[in-house]
Image (tube, rainbow, N blue to C red):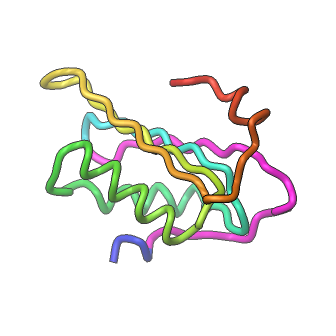
Amino acid sequence: MRRDRLVTQPSPDPRHDYLVELRGEPQGGTRLLLRLVPDRLVLEPAGFAGYLGGFADFPGGLEALALALLDDINNELVPRWVEVTVERDAPLPHRVVIEDRQPTWDNPQLMGRLRRV
């Protein structure tokens, strides 16, 4: 199972909100930016790279890829806030951005400082 490759560890201090960004290439020519505010768990970056390798033959468009990534991250980490961006340049520039958050979480100061990619 693809999610088994996601390696997590406890957050160093779940009392604080902080932003984590990970980048990768789940498929040739497809760029990924994962941004999240962890809750109790954080991703191990090396494990995340291995997890992305499971998408090499993913059968679907960028929308399906973004939704699959979001679903996996939400199920394994349950972050306070998460944003998945996938994009490729060929055959035409195409970009998908999807966001989710825990229903009761809000940090306007942190969210206001995020630069849009």
Q: Is 20 above or below relative to 3?
A: above
Q: Residue at x 51, y 24 (%)?
A: 117
Q: Residue at x 66, y 62 (%)?
A: 42
| Image quadrant where residue 77 sits | bottom right
Q: Is 82 above or below relative to 108?
A: below
Give the image location of residue 55, x and y in percent. Answer: 28, 57
- Confirm whether the magenta stretch covers residue 16: yes
Q: Residue at x 51, y 51 (%)?
A: 100
The number of numbered badges drawn on the structure is: 0
- Confirm whether the magenta stretch covers residue 91: no
In-image side of 20 versus 64 (left or right): right
Q: Nearer the viewer, residue 66 or 26?
A: 66
Give the image location of residue 45, x and y in percent. Answer: 58, 55
Q: Residue furthest front?
A: 104
- Which residues fall within the magenta stretch? 5-27
Q: Residue at x 50, y 58 (%)?
A: 48
In-image side of 58 versus 54 (left or right): left
Q: Nearer the viewer, residue 82 or 23?
A: 82
Give the image location of residue 76, x and y in percent. Answer: 53, 71
Which quadrant is home to the N terminus? bottom left
| Image quadrant where residue 105 sits | bottom right
Q: Nearer the viewer, residue 34 or 103?
A: 103
Give the image location of residue 12, x and y in percent. Answer: 82, 62
In-image side of 4 versus 15 (left or right): left
